[in-house]
Amino acid sequence: MPLKETHTSEGFREIDRWDGGVGWMAHPDETMQRASHALVHDGDLWIIDPVDASELDDLLADFGDVAGVVVLLDRHMRDAEEIARRHEVPLYLPTWVRRSVSGIPVRRFERTLADTDFRVLKLFDNPAWQEAGLYDETTGTLVVPESVGTAEYFRTGRERLGVHPMVRLLPPNELRGLTPERILVGHGAGVFDDAAVTLADTLDGSRRRYPSLLASTVRRLSPL
């Protein structure tokens, strides 16, 4: 199983679907399990941290016209620029995400995503890690690109959702106290059942379960 595929996918696996959007994995067999999402707001479609795939536009067309492509993490450019060019829409970046983009319009946002109800969460802003989350309290949709995930390397054996190994000891406080109905992540399928309870347990147990995550990672990487 490759860590990360670099070629354009000939297909994709739909992983998350609800009234307000859809999620997909362009390369479902890769270890990183990179997940992408499209969120609907007032008839507009916002594409989040996308990995491209053939026939992807057919999926997006079922949900509306693309208003913009959004990158929430400094290292999640993925295929965002290409998809923005194809749909002739701007690329949206949080004000603190330091990425240079050329050849397409760039729009910066800080408190909300454009004119949507998605509140912006400033999760990390340091030289090594710049990350934003999105939270719509009305619909209960929370988007977290990297701080938490459901891919195997994020989780201990007992967790449905895990904090990224690099920030296990200091998970972002901005996620505490939120009561989402669904959690969409940048690595793995989303959490749609008991999302608020799951998020609270994930954050509360992050430090305590760190040794267990390290041990499982060593076992997974050890030669047979």
Image (spheres, rainbow, N blue to C red):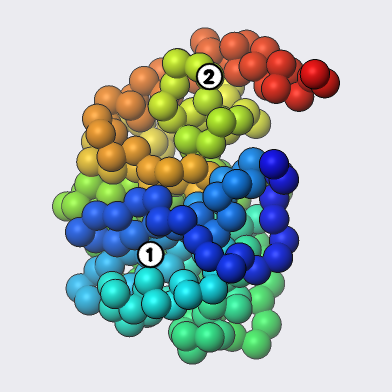
Residue contact between numbered discs 2 and 1, judged by CB atoms under 8 Å: no
Measured in 3D between alpha carbons, the distance from the residue under mark 2 to the one under mark 1, in whole angstroms, is 28 Å
Question: x, y percentage for residue 162?
Answer: 49, 28
Q: Nearer the viewer, residue 95 or 209?
A: 209
- The mark found on residue 98 in the picture is none
In the image, what residue occupies the spot 35% across and 51% down? 16
Residue 20 picture quarter: bottom left
Outermost right residue: 223
Q: Quadrant of the N terminus?
A: top right
Q: Nearer the viewer, residue 32 or 78?
A: 32
- The mark found on residue 156 in the picture is 2
Question: x, y percentage for residue 153?
Answer: 60, 30
Q: Quadrant of the C terminus?
A: top right
Q: Nearer the viewer, residue 161 or 124?
A: 161
In the image, what residue occupies the spot 61% across and 65% down? 9
Above or below, 52 against 145 in this view is: below
Q: Is residue 206 left or right of residue 217?
A: left
Q: Earlier in the sequence, mark 2 or mark 1?
A: 1
In the image, what residue occupies the spot 64% across and 16% down? 216
Above or below, 161 against 34 in this view is: above
* Amino acid type, label 1: Ala
* Amino acid type, label 2: Thr
Reading the image, the residue beneath label 1 is 38
Residue 152 picture quarter: top right
Secondary element under disc 2, as helix, strand or loop, is loop
